[in-house]
Image (cartoon, rainbow, N blue to C red):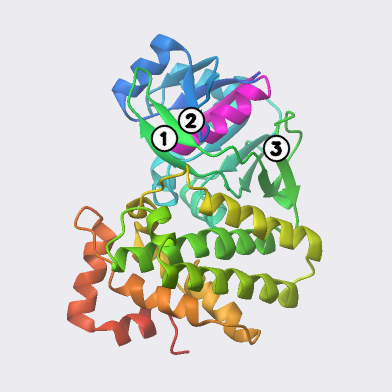
Amino acid sequence: MRALQFGAGKIGRGFFAERYTRSGLEVVFVEARPELVQSLNRHRFCWVEWLDGTRTHCAPVSALLPEPCEALAQAFCEAVVVSTAVGVNRLPTIAPLIAFGLRARAEARKPPLNILLGENDLHADRILREALPPLEAEFGLVRCIIGRQVVAEIPGDPPGVRADSYSKLPVDADALVGDLPPIEGLQPVRPFEVYFQRKLYVHNGLHALIAYLGAEKGYATIQQALSDPEIKQLYLRGAEALERAFLKAFTFDPQEHREMIADVRARIEDPRLDDPIARVAREPLRKLRPEDRLVGAYRLLKTHGEDAEPFWRAIQAALRYHDPSDPEAVQLQTLRREKGEAWILQEWCRLGE
């Protein structure tokens, strides 16, 4: 059985391919980098280095360039699951290829197909659906929650990735169609939006809080920033406040909820991770949107009377974040110079409402 994976980046190789091959599936990547396609086809495996230094080879794998060709049509017809990890903004660019493949499946009278959207965006399904033309094929656009931290590419032929060993893959139970093959770690959940919000605010929110406060003080990694007593204290306050706020707002099992937050904290704080702040802080405009990890968490805490100061401090630090290699960071600083911080908070973050 085959899985078709759009994107052979860190999540594509370091999470989806590892989960699929562990579950007995062959992986076919669709990847835009010709040299990576050639390397994967030459060696027929990719690999993950875990935080303890051990490595896992994921095989068999192969790769295709993103072109509407017979090989892609065949891969779609043979796939038992499709997934994406290309970045939510790039979903419209792969929509024609997905439409091409789904038409091939419809012509071959294949059963319904689930497309797992590994983009960590609540609206990924809508974004892709709006980019697709009308299709006869039956398919599900299934949002996912990606929790594994894949922090670095490792040079090689083929190149590897460095990751933690988190293995759960919560997916939108209400979007699934037909049958999925057994995939280790896959967990259908409902209501998906609540689970997604918890992961976004707790994991991504606390991560971003450390990153922006750390960047402001000149630290290079999350672990360096956590060694700063002031940042560590704000992070701990934020985690404790979110733990209480989610139990007030939703009907999570208290023990499961506390275990989830403890697991997130242990993984963020792992000294072996050496996680670059530039990775966690990139695309600050997206992360300052009203419902995203910083502003959304801040609003939740304010609504439920919890300590929101740590996230307010993180929002202020994010407004000042600058990385010349990050187009969004450059755009943010242009807005800050031309419009001012108050305008960004009001018009972009919607914090004046």
Badge 2 vs badge 1, beta-carbon distance below 8 Å: yes
Q: Quadrant of residue 339?
A: bottom left
> To which residue does mark 3 refer?
185
Residue 104: x, y in percent?
Answer: 55, 25
Point out the stretch of residues depicted in magenta. 2-24
| Residue 317 falls left or right of residue 137 | left
Pick the residue in front: 12 or 178. Answer: 12
Q: Secondary structure at mark 1?
A: loop
Q: CA distance from mark 2 to mark 1?
A: 6 Å
What mark, if any, has residue 9 been given in the picture? Answer: 1
Label 2 sits on residue = 13
Q: What residue is drawn where x is 59% and y is 37%?
A: 165
Q: Amino acid at mark 1?
A: Gly
Q: Residue 253 location, x and y as percent?
A: 81, 63
Q: Residue type at mark 3? A: Gly
Q: Secondary structure at mark 2?
A: helix
x and y, in percent, of residue 297 in the image = 55, 73
Residue beneath the point at 80% across and 66% down: 254
All told, the count of numbered labels is 3
- Choose the circle earlier in sequence order: 3 or 1: 1
